[in-house]
Amino acid sequence: MNDPQKELKDLKPKHDFLVAIDSDGCAFDSMEIKHKECFIPNIIKHWNLQPVSKYTRSAAEFVNLYSKWRGINRFPALLMVFDLLKDWPEVQKRNVLIPEALSLRSWMDHETKLGNPTLRAEVEKTKDPVLTQALIWSEAVNETIEDVVKGVPPFPFVRENLENISGWADIIVCSATPYDALRREWEEHDIAKYTRIIAGQEMGSKKEHLQFVSDGKYKKDHVIMIGDAPGDMKAARANNVKFFPVNPGHEEDSWEFFFKEAAGKFANEKYSQEYEAKLVNEFDKLLPEIPWWKK
């Protein structure tokens, strides 16, 4: 069986530094259009949530855009939406059946590469109706994204940063988005050329991306993850590497700051724990854990 993580494991460093960059909402201003126009309509349609569509929209926007879970993989995000709906009194009054999705939860307990290829293999093996429904939904999301999300450029200063960084560091895309969408978007805007690897959900979690691409190849303080979500920071922490936050709602300022100051500190080994902690403190304040309807 082919190893989907082989490309990460086989990477040979060309530079002493490695920069991993998340894509949706971090490099590209694509989170809002993908979730509001592609993910959420398909959640409502394929999971029969039309009677509680406005609550589903609120729950899905909270999980995927406006909370500490922003940017997580689509499958755990979907289950979080279901759980929020089941716990919402106004939804309960409508007597709508919210999916338990037990077999999807079970699959996620033992699978780390949470993407359509591994889900399709599980569907073929088990013929489970919930997993089948999840695959149909996920494929519909991809089709809608391909149809709808076009011409969305990277944030200002992303291109300038990539041009700068590529002169002294290896760059990888480290994302929970499917590879085909990543490749399409990075190539559409002619910035794929700056990367060594584009790693999507098929190659595993962001934690695994960083682990397999960096272990034994780079000094820990020579690796940095740039991301817009707490999950990106957790992946960095799990690998004991640096993290630079792209602040939701202030992405342009973050990329300009990295270009003008933070990149130089990282390259010159002056990106200290204290310096990072100050940036992370500002980042933490932007994303709540409790949804507005529970306050």
Image (spheres, helix red, strand yellow):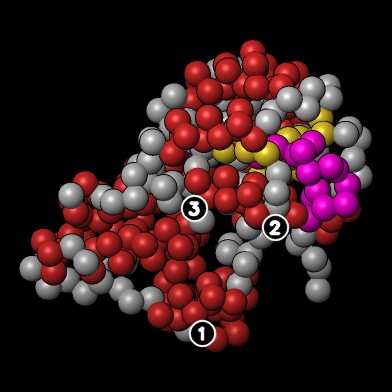
Which quarter of the figure has residue 13? top right
Instruction: Calculate the distance from the C-alpha at mark 3 to the C-alpha at mark 2.
Output: 14 Å
At which x and y percent is residue 53?
Answer: 21, 55
Stretch in magenta? 212-226
Which residue type carries mark 2? Glu
Quadrant containing the N terminus in the rendered view: bottom right
Q: Residue at x 29, y 58 (%)?
A: 44
Circle 2: element type: helix
Magenta region includes residue 238:
no
Which residue type carries mark 1? Lys
Within 10 angstroms of label 2, few (less than 14), some, or many (20 or more) residues? some
Within 10 angstroms of label 3, few (less than 14), some, or many (20 or more) residues? many
- The label on residue 72 is 3
In front here: 133 or 114? 114
Going by the image, does 44 lie left or right of 119? left
Q: Nearer the viewer, mark 3 or mark 1?
A: 3
Position of 65 relative to 72 (above/below): above
Residue at label 2?
A: 208
Q: Earlier in the sequence, mark 3 or mark 1?
A: 3
Residue at label 1?
A: 127
Q: Earlier in the sequence, mark 3 or mark 2?
A: 3
